[in-house]
Image (cartoon, rainbow, N blue to C red):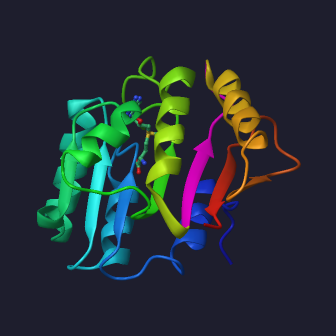
Amino acid sequence: MNNKPLRVIDLAQEFLRPIINSGDIVVDATAGTGQDTLFLCQCVGASGQVFAFDIQAVALQQTNDLLEKSGYADQVTLIHQSHADIVPALQAVAVRKHSVKAIMFNLGYLPNGDQTIITQVETTLAALNGALSLLAAGGLITICLYPGHLGGKTESQAVISWCEALKAPFVAHHFRTLNRESPPTLVIIESMR
Ligand SMILES: C[S@@+](CC[C@H](N)C(=O)[O-])C[C@H]1O[C@@H](n2cnc3c(N)ncnc32)[C@H](O)[C@@H]1O
């Protein structure tokens, strides 16, 4: 029996695994150490395409090292740019609207990195708006929220308010632990297009 509580990131992957097919186009909006990028590579297989954003070169280096070690480096495009630019950055590599099956956001700071470099409300919401226009029918956006760090609560509340105002064809869900203080939480957005 595993004595660690469920992590939101594992939960996000559980939702994504059944809906991603080999050959799909998917995006990691916050590459960080590359764990989610690697997961996405495993889901889409050799015929799929994975795009991973981060504003920190050190994060993209860690992601690239992990992908090289795992044999997936060739199928991933690492984008050293803010995810706020998700639409123009993906248009530049010929990704069309409504063609991306999954977009993962894992907000906050780089694990074991500079904790002053965090995702910010304005750029996160810009990225989420862009992500909606890229999402394919039946696709999912996952957002792991971390209200426990400085600035995290404000960002979490902003994302939740933005989700509450979403209109069809999108449906937003919020999953949270009930008996911990400031637990990470998970938002899932479905496209019912
Ligand atoms: C919690 S970490 C992501 C963890 C990652 N998914 C993993 O598997 O390790 C958040 C990452 O978001 C990045 N980030 C912050 N602002 C960003 C932005 N505007 N655009 C893209 N990435 C950003 C940080 O540099 C950091 O690496």
Camera-nearest residue between 42 and 111? 42
Image x and y of residue 191, in percent: 61, 63
Residue at 18% over, 42% down = 61
Q: Quadrant of residue 158?
A: top right
| Above-or-below relation of 20 to 66 | below
Q: Find residue 183 and report its image quarter.
A: top right
Residues shaded magenta: 139-150
Q: Verify whether residue 188 appears in magenta.
A: no
The number of numbered badges drawn on the structure is: 0
Front residue of 169 and 18: 169
- Residue 176 rendering spot, x and y as whole percentages: 78, 51
Q: Compared to 79, does 115 lie above or below?
A: above
In depth, the one of 13 and 5 nearer the eye is 13
Q: Is residue 83 left or right of residue 179?
A: left
Locate ligand 1 by image quadrant: top left
Query: At 64% from the left edge and 56% from the top edge, which residue is drawn?
Result: 189
Question: Would you say 109 lies left or right of 77 here?
Answer: right
Instruction: Report x, y in % for residue 185.
Output: 70, 47
Give coordinates of residue 49: x percent, y percent: 25, 66
Q: Quadrant of the N terminus?
A: bottom right
